[in-house]
Amino acid sequence: MNIPLSKPDITELEVDSVTQVLRSERLSLGPKLCEFESAFAEYAGTRYAVATNSGTSALHLSVRAMDIGHQDEVVTSAFSFIASTNCFLYEGAVPVMLDIDPTTLNLDPKHVRSFLKQCCVVDSATGCVINKQTGRTVKAILPVHVFGVPCDMDPILELASQFGLSVLEDACEAIGAEYHGRRVGTFGDAAVFAFYPNKQMTSGEGGMIVTNNERIAALCRSMRNQGRDDDSSWLNHVRLGYNYRLSELHCALGLAQLKRLPELLEARERVAMGYNRALAEIPHLILPSSHINDRKRSWFVYVVQLDYPGAKAIRDRIIERLRERGIQSQAYFPSLHTQAHIAADAEIPLGSLIRTEVASDRSLALPFFPTLRSEEVQYIAETLRQILEDELGAPRPSSATLHATVEAGR
């Protein structure tokens, strides 16, 4: 077999939608853009949605629209895709990296509270939150809904309100996820989604800013199109902007996928449950949690953790050996504070990020996409079992037992 790490689910609906745009001769800044934004805002449950050419672009525009600038500090997690920190560095802002919850792998509100109460003071003259260790202003919190698991938003919002901080949700991996019955992306001042081909839905490349704040939406619309004025007058530029537009082709693809999103989310959950059953009896594996308190997970990736001393070296060998058997896998995520261009700038005020580093060293992403077949899940599980037995001496049941387990959960 040859099984990729991810694969988009594209049907004739998507092909027909894109073909119609190609025949329309309107390939950018056309009706599909407005239609996609309107449909997405309705799905997300926000007043505004602003489409961009990537989730990274959406994060960058949100940072600028929220007035986060040079030497401002933003509280966030180091267990994330690099874009959630790069978006601050673009503006000369400083990421303040705090540790994660070991179950959800998300930013731990307890550490946010400790940082704000122990390391910060509110300036009586300006009302700004000042980091006593650096003298810089703390502007915002950026929680990342890692792997489609919602962050614990209530305490984060409570702290943000208490200290007058903005909240920017990175929901790039979490479309369809819910916290206390409410969709992620509706809690902060703004939120960002992404539509890269490995996401729950795709527009090929693309991102979306959602917000209830009219000012943020207007600024982002202007800045994505070279800083044009509010009515997008031709060559009338009123502020610094960027070429972060999303084409009509991408919008058509995104619209078609959005129509199929419930089906796509359900299929991903079925694959995840199949993995849970197939891998349940394999020693030294920690499987991803399906249910966490009052939260609904949206399955973005399927990441297991290797529970064994020296996990990083063993995990890396497993990746190579899986590749030899035609199975693509990956380490998800390398700790951001260990990346060379981030290490020099990031603040780590509460000491080392032990939980982040442990999760980074032992996490392994297996192939995951909605059309992954049960026999492929079986092959991946059996191959991983064999490799673990070779590496760690772990016992394994027979192939027949494994096959029966997978088939029972079809």
Image (cartoon, rainbow, N blue to C red):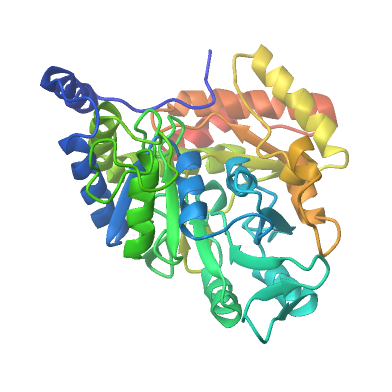
Residue 206 in picture, x, y percent from top left: 39, 35
Residue 137 in picture, x, y percent from top left: 68, 68
- Which corner quadrant of the image does residue 53 belong to? top left
The structure residue drawn at horizontal position 30% and vertical position 25%, both measured from the top left corner, is: 10
In the rendered image, the vertical position of residue 1 relative to residue 366, given as above or below? above
Residue 282 horizontal side relative to residue 253, left or right: right
Residue 66 in picture, x, y percent from top left: 49, 60
Residue 152 in picture, x, y percent from top left: 56, 67
Front residue of 211 and 198: 211
- Quadrant location of the C terminus in the rendered image: top left
Note whether residue 284 is visible: no
Front residue of 271 and 25: 25
Note whether residue 119 is visible: yes
The structure residue drawn at horizontal position 51% and vertical position 59%, both measured from the top left corner, is: 168
Residue 242 horizontal side relative to residue 334, left or right: left
Most distant residue in the bottom direction: 124
- Which corner quadrant of the image does residue 139 belong to? bottom right
Front residue of 368 and 96: 96
In the rendered image, the vertical position of residue 131 relative to residue 218, given as above or below? below
